[in-house]
Amino acid sequence: MSVTSTYSVTGMTCAHCVQAVTSELSELSGVDAVQVDLAAGVVTVTSAAPLAAADVRAAVDEAGYELADG
């Protein structure tokens, strides 16, 4: 069974931003797919099991962006 989670990410402005966030999140254990909506600033992650919020935040930070609170 897959789990789909949506996160708001601030600071993304271009295709490079999308690639960086997608790359970092894809490296998390269990992640099957990452879909970035640049215009909305939203990232949807499909994974085998729920992801730890701290892991998602760390991956987004590593890409150079910020996970929005809430």
Image (cartoon, grey):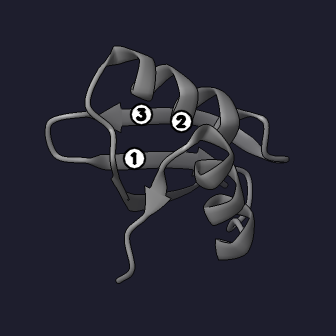
Q: Residue at x 42, y 27 (%)?
A: 17
Read off the residue under disc 3. 35
Read off the residue under disc 1. 43
Whether label 2 touches label 1, CB < 8 Å: yes
- Tell me the CA gap for discs 1 and 3: 6 Å
In the rendered structure, which disc, 2 or 3, sits on the residue that comes first in sequence?
2
Q: Is residue 37 above or below residue 56?
A: above
The single residue placed furthest to the top in the displayed view is 15
Q: Residue at x 39, y 80 (%)?
A: 69
Q: Is residue 54 visible?
A: yes
Residue 16 in the image, given as x and y percentages of width and height: 43, 17
Q: Residues within 10 Å of mark 3 (few under 14, many from 20)?
A: some
Whether label 2 touches label 3, CB < 8 Å: no
Q: Secondary structure at mark 1?
A: strand
Q: Residue at x 68, y 46 (%)?
A: 62
Q: Is residue 62 above or below residue 38?
A: below
Residue 26 in the image, given as x and y percentages of width and height: 69, 34
Read off the residue under disc 2. 21
Q: Secondary structure at mark 3?
A: strand
Q: Is residue 2 visible?
A: no
Q: Residues within 10 Å of mark 1 (few under 14, many from 20)?
A: many
